Image: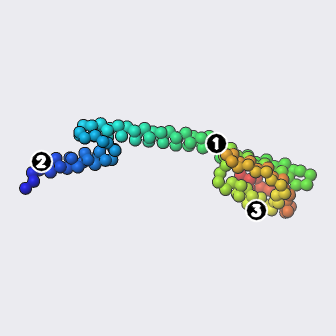
Amino acid sequence: MVSREHKRGSSLREKFHLLRSITDSHAESETSIIVDASKYIKKLKQKVEKINNATTSEQSFRESSDPNPMVTVETLEKGFMIKVMSRKNEAGMLVCVLETFEDLGLDVVEARVSCTDTFSLHAIGSSNVNTVLPYHHFI
């Protein structure tokens, strides 16, 4: 029969072996394995802190950015000029703006678009329908 202390010692050795493999320790003594595990935990905490700091700074940048684009409309001799500008480029923003123009019955004759980091659209167009454009369609 195997004694209780022998089982406990065997179990403890298995746990140290597992701890050694998890922390990628090459130490032989139990004390060195624990020291290596402590260093490993410290490195993990530093990584988590870096990730949290990066997430926090990214979140504060997003919150400080103006979520609504700036829209200006100028009437021209034969049509209008619309400028849409935003500090950040959201995925699908250009498609959304063009679909809004289409919904409002606006024909874009000429357009310049930049959507690298920021979003900028300068469009010259004409209305194929005689309607008053509600402000909320551009927001």
Q: CA distance from mark 1 to mark 3?
A: 28 Å
Answer whether residue 67 is visible to the viewer in this image.
yes
Query: If you read the primary sequence from the N terminus, does the residue marked by circle 2 or circle 3 appear first?
Result: 2
Residue under numbered circle 3: 103
Residue visible at 7% across and 56% down?
Answer: 1
Residue 60 percent location from the top left of the image: 57, 40
Q: Secondary structure at mark 3?
A: helix
Q: Secondary structure at mark 1?
A: loop
Residue type at tag 3: Asp
Apparent side of residue 90 relative to residue 7 in the rendered image (left or right):
right
Is 52 above or below relative to 82?
Answer: above
Residue type at tag 1: Ser
Q: Which disc, if any, is residue 65?
A: 1
Residue visible at 89% across and 50% down?
Answer: 76
Apparent side of residue 10 relative to residue 74 in the rendered image (left or right):
left
| Mark 2 crowdedness (10 Å alpha carbons): few <14, some 14-19, many ≥20 | few
Residue 37 percent location from the top left of the image: 32, 40
- Which picture quadrant has residue 106? bottom right
Q: Which disc, if any, is residue 5?
A: 2
Which mark's residue is nearer the viewer, 2 or 3?
2
Residue 81 percent location from the top left of the image: 83, 51
Is 1 above or below relative to 61?
Answer: below
| Mark 1 crowdedness (10 Å alpha carbons): few <14, some 14-19, many ≥20 | few
| Mark 3 crowdedness (10 Å alpha carbons): few <14, some 14-19, many ≥20 | few
Residue farthest to the right, as pictured:
77
**Nearest the eye: 42 or 137:** 42
Q: CA distance from mark 1 to mark 2?
A: 64 Å
